Amino acid sequence: MSKTAIIYSFHTQKSKKVAEKIMEAFGKDQLEAVNAEELTKEIIEKYDHFILSAPTWFDGELPNYWDEFVPDLEEMDLSKKSFAIFGLGDQKGYPENFCDAIGLLAEILEGCGAKIVGQTSVEGYTYEASRAQRGNQFIGLPLDQENQARLTKERVGKWVEKLKEEFFN
């Protein structure tokens, strides 16, 4: 049976809360939580499917823990693995790079042969630019806890249903 990990920083507040909502919607016994700050190649090799948290830091950057793991990641063959990425951003405060970290991480993973799943519509968001956008879709699930927190539960629920289909069918 395939194994699925949800990887996020255990030391964050907003990303951790969203990860907990995803685990609840997915079924807590269906996902294994991994602290992104303790990520190793061996952990990546252990799982088939991944849900990754990629909050956008500063002006469109990956968090330090992802930056530090990227060199190891770039050496891996991920062609038999699938990844879904959710990220937090601020449409009003940083409209020119809304949830860029989702796109940055997806580009790195795709460069290693990974399959990216969990695309979502750009409808309902207001921003200027995002590296997470491809056509009329986001490559993952962007969430804005600053301006649209009330939409998170519904967005997570729909996304998780889509992931279950894409991971396991």
Image (cartoon, grey):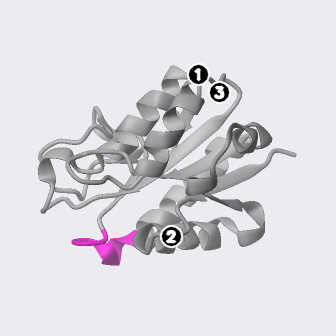
Which residue is found at the position 54% from the left and 73% from the top?
Answer: 21
| Whether residue 127 can be seen here | no
> Which residue matches tag 1?
113
The span picked out in magenta is 145-152
Do the numbered discs 1 and 3 sit on residues whose CB atoms are within 8 Å?
yes
For disc 3, the neighbor class at 10 Å (few under 14, some 14 to 19, many from 20) is many
User: Could you say which is closer to the camera, residue 62 or residue 97?
Assistant: 62
Q: Nearer the N terminus, badge 2 or badge 3? A: 2
Is 150 contained in the magenta span? yes
Q: Is residue 71 above or below residue 65?
A: above
User: Could you say which is closer to the camera, residue 107 or residue 1?
Assistant: 107
- Expressed as whole percent of the image width and height from the top left, the position of residue 164 reads 65, 52
* Quarter residue 126 falls in: bottom left
Q: Secondary structure at mark 1?
A: loop
* Distance between mark 2 and mark 3 Cα atoms: 27 Å
> Which residue matches tag 2?
11
- Expressed as whole percent of the image width and height from the top left, the position of residue 77 reads 66, 22
